[in-house]
Image (cartoon, helix red, strand yellow):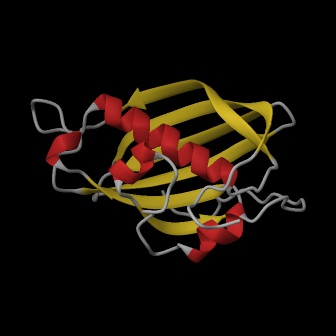
Amino acid sequence: MRTSGYISIFVFVMQNNNYDNLKALEGQYFTQSLSEAGKWLHYKLLLVEPGYIEASILIRDDMTNPWKQLHGGIISMISDELCGLSFYSLGHDTFYTTISLNIDYLFSAPAGINVIVKARVIRSGKRIANVECYLFDEEERIIAHATTNLMNTGSKIFNLTIGNS
């Protein structure tokens, strides 16, 4: 899947600097996350656009099932993490939380390879947002496709990264 034609354009005024903070980390490992799960995944931000994130993750042995393939639960965590990050790149001023996560497991991925994750916001509403992501192996085969719905909690948004306002 190519990036062109995949990035949605959102036109509105960003209400915080989450996008700028993320964009500044493009090409780097996202180690400043407030999410311990996100830190553990140790992913590299490849591309950051409003409502769109591309990242790479090296599949380590501690991410695999007994057959040394990427564990389904880790695919779920990757999907939730990157879908959420793509949504927060839009700069909303309130916190949205995951209320559903649906995953189609399509292909296996062994330890030692880099997985590419592409996540994009499909719809960003006042109460509900819909986001999807794809995980690809190094040969560009789709490992998994996930869709998620996020619900606005009404709580003020927090900073996604340590030390940024």
Whether residue 3 is visible: yes
Residue occupying image coordinates x 17% and y 31%: 65
Give the total number of marks visible in the rendering.
0
Residue occupying image coordinates x 56% and y 50%: 119
For residue 28, what is the image quadrant? bottom left
Percent position (x, y) of residue 139? 28, 58
Whether residue 6 is visible: no
Percent position (x, y) of residue 4? 61, 66
Residue toward you, 95 or 149? 95
Residue toward you, 148 or 43? 43
Quarter of the C terminus within the rendering: bottom right
For residue 89, what is the image quadrant? bottom right
Percent position (x, y) of residue 62? 18, 42
Q: Please say if 40 is above or below 11.
A: above
- Which residue is outermost to the front? 163
Residue occupying image coordinates x 48% and y 62%: 32
Q: Please say if 7 is above or below 149.
A: below
Percent position (x, y) of residue 64? 19, 38
Viewed as shown, does residue 1 lie left or right of 106? right
Viewed as shown, does residue 134 lie left or right of 120? left
Viewed as shown, does residue 56 lie left or right of 158? left
For residue 84, what is the image quadrant? top right
- Which residue is outermost to the left? 67
Q: Please say if 20 is above or below 125.
A: below
